[in-house]
Image (cartoon, rainbow, N blue to C red):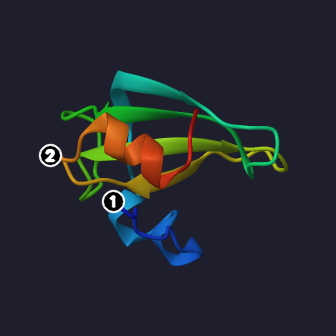
Amino acid sequence: MYLPPVIHEDLIDSVETQGYVPGHIESVMRFGPKSRWRAGAIVDSATERSQAVATRCALLIPRRGRRTRKLALHPALPADVIKSMLQAL
């Protein structure tokens, strides 16, 4: 059985995501009614405009608040594993 790693608050909006400009949308995520996230997307960066270290991020829209949060992702990590880690539907 695969147990996904725990997503800590320290990993969200980390140093790697500063200056990140989203480009191509890879996958869209939905979350359940009890999740802290309303929706999200897995995106690749715009290579010409992005100044961040991260080349792939999960953009997360919280239920409360207006600011989109960013989670840096490994480029080789499959979208299904990311959705499992974030408990997306």
Q: Residue at x 45, y 54 (%)?
A: 85
Q: Is residue 37 above or below residue 41?
A: below
The residue that disc 1 covers is 1
Say left or right for 19 vs 56.
right
The amino acid type of the residue labelled 1 equals Met
Question: Which quadrant would residue 40 be assigned to in this image?
Answer: top right
- Between label 1 and label 2, give the one nearer the viewer: 1
Spot occupied by residue 49 in the image (x, y as percentages of width and height) = 28, 36
Describe the element under mark 2 as helix, strand or loop: loop
Q: Position of residue 45 (x, y in %)?
A: 28, 36
Name the disc covering residue 44, or none.
none
Spatial CA span between label 1 and label 2: 21 Å
> Which amino acid type corresponds to the residue marked 2 in the rendered image?
Ala
Horizontally, is 75 left or right of 33 in the view?
left
Q: Is residue 30 above or below residue 5?
A: above
Task: Indicate the position of residue 7 as horizontal and vertical percent values.
Answer: 50, 67
Q: Residue at x 29, y 42 (%)?
A: 50
- At label 2, counting other C-alpha atoms closer than 10 Å, the crowd grade (few under 14, some 14-19, many 20 or more) is few
- Which quadrant holds the N terminus? bottom left
Tags 1 and 2 touching, CB below 8 Å: no
Would you name the residue on which mark 2 appears? 76
- Residue located at (58% from left, 73% from top): 9
Mark 1 / mark 2, whichever is N-terminal: 1
The residue lying at 52 percent from left, 51 percent from top is 86
Q: In which quadrant will I find the C terminus?
A: top right
**What is the x, y in percent for residue 36?**
75, 52
Q: Residues within 10 Å of mark 1 (few under 14, many from 20)?
A: few
